Image (cartoon, grey):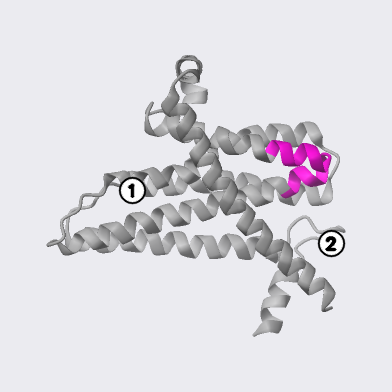
Amino acid sequence: MDRLIDWIRNYKFSVSDPPIITMEGLFSLLLLLVLSLAAVFFHLIRIFFNAPVDFSMDWNLFLSWIPLLVAFFADSITKRFPEIPVTLLLISIAWLAFFPNAPYMITDLAHLTVDYQRDLTWHDTIMLFFYAEVSLFNGLVSLYWIHRAWRRVFYRGTANMMLVISLPLAGFGVYLGRVRRMNSWDIIHEPGLIITNLFESIMDRTALVFSLEIGLLLGVLYLVLWGIIRFRIRYNKKHQ
């Protein structure tokens, strides 16, 4: 079994060196896809036994895949072409525009209504948590991939600074979505409204606290993910 997993992770789809795409990245996407389908399955159970909760959950879960795929593309292309700072900056802007959709689903837990005598209360709790968890996984993995791409193309200090800045910006994006009821597509459809909300929110204490707390949450979780991955990489190198 271990040999099979190693072969899958190291299989190369490209003859280039280093390979543009390996099974390691696709395997991560496959695992996240399985988790996403499991979350949807919880919703299907809810629909079978009662009325559907809200199909916006499925839409929000889908949106959390956009930054994941963008980051996967950035990580893959910088393996082969590490000297593309302008291109990576444009990709990073697109990633940042959709990245808040990943932690956004945490705020869906606010929709929970507690009725201890109702069985669906517990199903809804688990279902909403599952959606939020998978969406957050998508966001953290996308953050790892885009950070790795930044580290390849820019100086390490610059890459780390971009990482730190992106965290509260993601929190601010969640605030715009949950409180101001805006979405990523408004950047294209209503850019003027985006700018208006930005200026109105600069002095908003709720926006500041919201942005910092979501950013702190993402930062702590990302540090845990980063530490686990880096420890495993160093451990494998020592025992090869």
State which tag comes first along the sequence, 2 or 1: 2
Q: Position of residue 133 (x, y in %)?
A: 45, 56
Count of marks, rendered view: 2
Read off the residue under disc 2.
Answer: 15
Q: Position of residue 68 (x, y in %)?
A: 58, 49
Circle 2: is it few (<14), some (14-19), or many (20+) Cα within 10 Å? few
Where does the magenta region start and end?
148-162
Residue drawn where x is 83% and y is 50% of the image: 80
Residue drawn where x is 78% and y is 36% of the image: 158
| Left or right side of 70 for 213 | left
**Above or below: residue 6 compared with residue 111:** below
Q: Position of residue 144 (x, y in %)?
A: 66, 51
Q: Main secondary structure of the magenta part?
A: helix
**Above or below: residue 90 compared with residue 136:** above
Element under disc 2:
loop
Quarter of the N terminus within the rendering = bottom right
**Above or below: residue 27 compared with residue 91:** below
Q: Which amino acid, by three-letter code, is at mark 1?
A: Leu
Q: Which mark is residue 109?
A: 1
Q: Which amino acid, by three-letter code, is at mark 2?
A: Val
Circle 1: is it few (<14), some (14-19), or many (20+) Cα within 10 Å? some
Quarter of the C terminus within the rendering = bottom right
Residue drawn where x is 55% and y is 43% of the image: 216
Q: Is residue 178 visible?
A: yes
Q: Is residue 185 visible?
A: no
